[in-house]
Amino acid sequence: MATREKAAVIGLGYVGIPLASLLADRGYAVVGMDIDPQRVGDVNEGRVPLKGDEPDLQPLLAKVVRKGWLKASEDFGGCRQAKTVFVCVDTPVDEQMRPDNRRMIAAAKRIGENLSKGTMVVVESTVAPGTMLGTVAPIIEGTSGLRLGRDFKLAHCPERVMPGRLLHNLTNYDRVLGSLDDESARRAEAIYSKLTAGELHRTGLTTAEVVKTAENAYRDVQIAFANEVSSICEKLGVDAFEVRKLVNTSPFRDMHLPGAGVGGHCLPKDPWLLAFGGREAQPVLIPTARMINDGMPFHVAELTADALRRMKVRRASAVVAVLGASYTGDAGDIRNSPTASLISCLEGVKEIRVHDPFVDDLYGVNVLRRAPDALKGADVAVFMVAHKEYARLTPSTLKKHMRRLAVVDGRNLFSEKRMTKAGFVYRGVGKGLS
Ligand SMILES: NC(=O)c1ccc[n+]([C@@H]2O[C@H](COP(=O)([O-])OP(=O)(O)OC[C@H]3O[C@@H](n4cnc5c(N)ncnc54)[C@H](O)[C@@H]3O)[C@@H](O)[C@H]2O)c1
């Protein structure tokens, strides 16, 4: 039997675990490395430590661990035998919205200390333009004593996964391969053609950095546009969702959905990475879009206050049920959750009860698993996430549990007409008062 080519994956999170599992399944002997011993332990026991529903990932991880094709370790020694080292560490921004590269720098140092000649390092993490050649390469050169290009190769293949669709995206989406030189590109192509049915697009390292951050900044700007139109609609007494539908009947228009906020690990920070990398151009639109989207949970808090006023409920006696704690529907990822921002704006109410079917704890706030437990005795139900379970709720179910009838709809889950007809005070993002 042919021996398996060795690969190392640094950082076992939403990106690293599916990548390591898939590489192992497609013929590589993989060592996964993480600084978190809990992560390492979970992977070695074949257990996916990620929250939310990830189709097919649990059986795949269990299989490749059982077969001995994937092992996890806190020791970076496994890089020495690896022909390819993939970097999948988290790359947040700091409080000034500048790249916080501490994890990337730490990983690059340890890769350098354990690097053999001929290895290729592939960064899958999203980084600010200029990071590959300005930070990653010099650190690896510094700690390894090896020369970039001559002794080791470098590529940047930014990841396009999304929680809830990790394996699907990994195996189907096109990939952009930013490479140092022809050999790096050929080697990256040989690997990624085994992982995805999508097309592989060759380009340079810096272009790949711009492509990934621009992909997410583009989406963020589009959402901000939809949110701004939704605020206009609310003031004018029209429905932003009807406006959107009709706008999109015009050719070449693709207006996005407005909503209660933008969260997750990527969209709230990747635009800042692009703006930082391109700071000499003094970008205006990208930071403005970020501020509009960050403001949406505050707007939901205003709608909630308005609903309470309309029912003549004093803030200090209000019981608020917040439905949805994750940042996106039917997933358990709470990073940069708009609900966390909303809760900070609801200060002064008597009680806040948060529900989410996929989350237990939201940064210290207890999250209830059953919706009736949150709705029982509530004055207002605030919907922050479009979990499928919420779309199935009817006015009569809500009536059964709530003590007063008000709904704040952050995700266009309900019809205003139906709710008001059923006796509810209804306020919603993008829903003008008729
Ligand atoms: N989550 C997504 O859906 C997604 C999608 C596309 C791109 N990305 C990008 O991929 C990268 C990783 O994101 P993620 O969501 O998987 O993050 P994550 O937080 O889920 O996982 C990162 C892992 O890296 C580990 N780590 C941190 N520093 C380390 C170090 N020095 N050495 C070894 N391990 C270390 C952490 O302990 C953690 O387990 C980020 O740059 C992100 O922007 C994420």
Image (cartoon, rainbow, N blue to C red):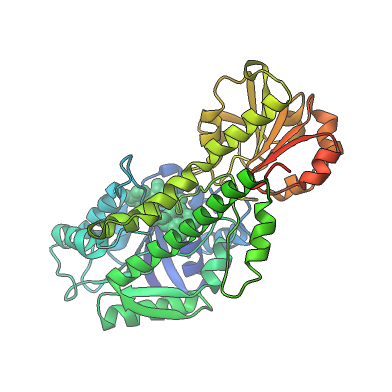
- The residue closer to the viewer here, 90 or 18, is 90
Report if residue 40 is visible in the image: no
The answer to whether residue 48 is above or below residue 1 is: above
Q: Is residue 350 left or right of residue 11?
A: right
Horizontal and vertical percent for residue 62?
Answer: 57, 58
Report if residue 313 is visible in the image: yes
Q: Residue at x 46, y 57 (%)?
A: 221
Q: How many marks?
A: 0
Q: Quadrant of residue 218?
A: bottom left
Horizontal and vertical percent for residue 174?
Answer: 48, 75
Q: Residue at x 57, y 46 (%)?
A: 231
Q: Residue at x 54, y 23 (%)?
A: 347
- The residue closer to the viewer here, 197 or 36, is 197
The answer to whether residue 184 is above or below residue 236 is: below
Quadrant, the C terminus: top right
Q: Is residue 409 left or right of residue 58?
A: right
The answer to whether residue 201 is above or below residue 61 is: below
- The residue closer to the viewer here, 302 or 128, is 302
Horizontal and vertical percent for residue 133?
Answer: 21, 65
The answer to whether residue 301 is above or below residue 162 is: above
Q: Quadrant of residue 380?
A: top right
